[in-house]
Image: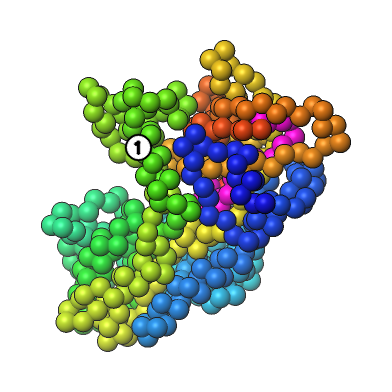
């Protein structure tokens, strides 16, 4: 049964992954072993169907509230072009964040009009391609605007842009960001660079923001502060048709909130010296014990969270604004709401498979399980991927070599550094681990496969 599969590899403090049916089918069949033989280790397995379902789920929330809405899939979250095709099939646009992403998507047959370019740094060539292909550009700073003035004049073409705003007030504190124009100064900046709205080749057609983290209340505050700016800019002659709330829609990787809370309790006990370490050399994951007190904050994605995706978006649209809701405010203004999810719409779309190459016992009793992969191949900027992997034993004819002893230890990778761990968490293998066994990291399509990947 499937529950037995989970038992073969468990965190010392377990964190069970949510799994899709296609993943369970592969984990209980023989295809993964054949594919590893054919393509090598590590292997990224991608299934685009959940992406379609996840986007439709968001569309439905907007449809129920009669809000003009469009998802722009954040292409940077995964390099696989089949996901671009799947997103386009739902009517979604694509968010590109580099020249390479842009040219790949254009070569895939997607029209530039269906794209937005949100690259944090945009060189002249990237801006030129955007203008040539009528790609909407999320403009981050005055220098980009000035570059666009030069490019639009030399090409004799208009540029469609969305102004990226930041500096929103939330609970009376100004949210810090390195991105965007300060909302308090935006109108003066625009008047200075685009004094003549009618004559300018730069057309401001949208307002855009991207907030760090996943806070719903911060986004409600940002929308509430963007709409008056949008109104005022329309009266100045700018034909603004959309408000883009960026990415950061939450998702949940884990089956069980109790496990998530218990993990952090056990981890705290270990850091305070009151329990056995559950991470490599008692790594803090962002926390540190000083004078018997924990300081710092978790440097990890919130792998368990609620609400997520559709329910979260509903919370945004149903939030109070003016005398009604944000949904009503968007409807009344004839403004399209856009968002740029990456990770959250890739929920359930992938997994990463690696083969065990060696097992070695350290003098302290811990086992090191060597995998044919390096740590960048399942990693984001988060300190660790806090989701239990799944072990599939190699079914070999020579079963006598099978070591049945319980092992505890760490998954290590191919880089020649002491810090080269695939996961910082300690795992238990009740029936041991053998050369040729497969370790599967579930739900890695969003950022984990490709964001930091290096060979």
For this orientation, the residue located farthest to the right is: 397
x, y percent for residue 201: 37, 74
- Residue range of the region highlighted in magenta in the rendering: 432-448
User: Is 125 rendered above or below residue 53?
Assistant: above
User: Is 147 rendered above or below residue 14?
Assistant: below
x, y percent for residue 298: 34, 40
**Residue 444 located within the stretch drawn in magenta:** yes
Residue 106 in sight from this viewpoint: no
User: Is 314 rendered above or below residue 387?
Assistant: below
Q: Residue at x 33, y 81 (%)?
A: 335
The quadrant in which residue 310 appears is bottom left
**Residue 167 located within the stretch drawn in magenta:** no
x, y percent for residue 385: 49, 42
> Label 1's element?
helix
Could you tell whether 64 is left or right of 98 in the image?
left
Q: Nearer the viewer, residue 343 or 108?
A: 343
Q: Quadrant of the C terminus?
A: top right
Q: Residue at x 74, y 48 (%)?
A: 32
Could you tell whether 97 is left or right of 396 in the image?
left
Q: Nearer the viewer, residue 250 or 16?
A: 16
Q: Nearer the viewer, residue 210 or 352?
A: 352
Q: Residue at x 72, y 39 (%)?
A: 393
The quadrant in which residue 58 appears is bottom left
Residue 214 in sight from this viewpoint: yes
x, y percent for residue 213: 34, 53
Could you tell whether 188 is left or right of 86 in the image?
left
Pointer 1 residue: 265
């Amino acid at each position: 049964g499937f529950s037995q599969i989970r038992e073969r590899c468990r965190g010392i403090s377990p964190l069970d992954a949510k799994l899709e049916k296609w993943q369970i089918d592969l984990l209980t069949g023989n295809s993964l072993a054949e594919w590893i033989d054919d393509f090598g280790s590590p292997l990224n397995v991608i299934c685009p169907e959940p992406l379609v379902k996840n986007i439709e789920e968001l569309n439905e929330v907007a449809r129920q509230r009669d809000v003009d809405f469009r998802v722009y899939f954040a292409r940077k979250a995964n390099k696989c072009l089949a996901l671009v095709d799947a997103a386009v099939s739902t009517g979604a646009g694509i968010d590109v964040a580099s020249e390479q992403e842009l040219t790949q998507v254009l070569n895939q047959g997607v029209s530039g009009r269906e794209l937005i370019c949100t690259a944090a740094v945009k060189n002249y060539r990237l801006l030129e391609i955007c203008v040539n292909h009528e790609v909407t550009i999320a403009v981050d700073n005055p220098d980009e605007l000035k570059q666009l003035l030069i490019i639009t004049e030399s090409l004799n073409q208009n540029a469609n842009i969305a102004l990226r705003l930041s500096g929103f007030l939330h609970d009376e504190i100004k949210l810090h960001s390195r991105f965007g124009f300060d909302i308090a100064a935006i109108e003066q900046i625009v008047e200075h660079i685009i004094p003549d709205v009618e004559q300018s080749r730069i057309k401001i057609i949208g307002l855009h923001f991207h907030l760090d983290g996943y806070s719903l209340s911060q986004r409600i505050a940002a929308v509430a502060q963007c709409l008056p700016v949008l109104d005022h800019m329309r009266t100045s002659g700018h034909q603004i048709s959309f408000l883009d709330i960026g990415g950061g829609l939450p998702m949940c990787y884990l089956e069980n909130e109790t496990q998530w809370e218990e993990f952090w309790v056990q981890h705290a006990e270990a850091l305070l010296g009151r329990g056995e370490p559950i991470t490599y050399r008692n790594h803090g994951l962002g926390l540190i014990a000083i004078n018997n007190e924990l300081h710092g904050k978790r440097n990890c994605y919130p792998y368990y969270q609620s609400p997520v995706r559709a329910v979260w978006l509903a919370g945004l649209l149903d939030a109070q604004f003016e005398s009604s809701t944000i949904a009503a405010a968007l409807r009344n203004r004839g403004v399209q709401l856009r968002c740029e999810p990456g990770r959250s719409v890739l929920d359930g779309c992938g997994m990463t498979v690696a083969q065990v190459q060696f097992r070695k016992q350290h003098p302290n009793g811990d086992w090191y399980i060597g995998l044919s992969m390096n740590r960048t191949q399942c990693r984001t900027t988060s300190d660790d991927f806090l989701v239990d992997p799944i072990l599939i034993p190699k079914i070999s004819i020579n079963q006598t070599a099978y070591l049945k002893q319980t092992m505890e230890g760490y998954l290590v990778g191919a880089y020649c550094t002491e810090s080269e761990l695939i996961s910082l968490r300690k795992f238990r293998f009740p029936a041991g681990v053998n050369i040729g066994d497969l370790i599967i990291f579930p739900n890695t399509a969003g950022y984990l496969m490709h964001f930091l990947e290096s060979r």
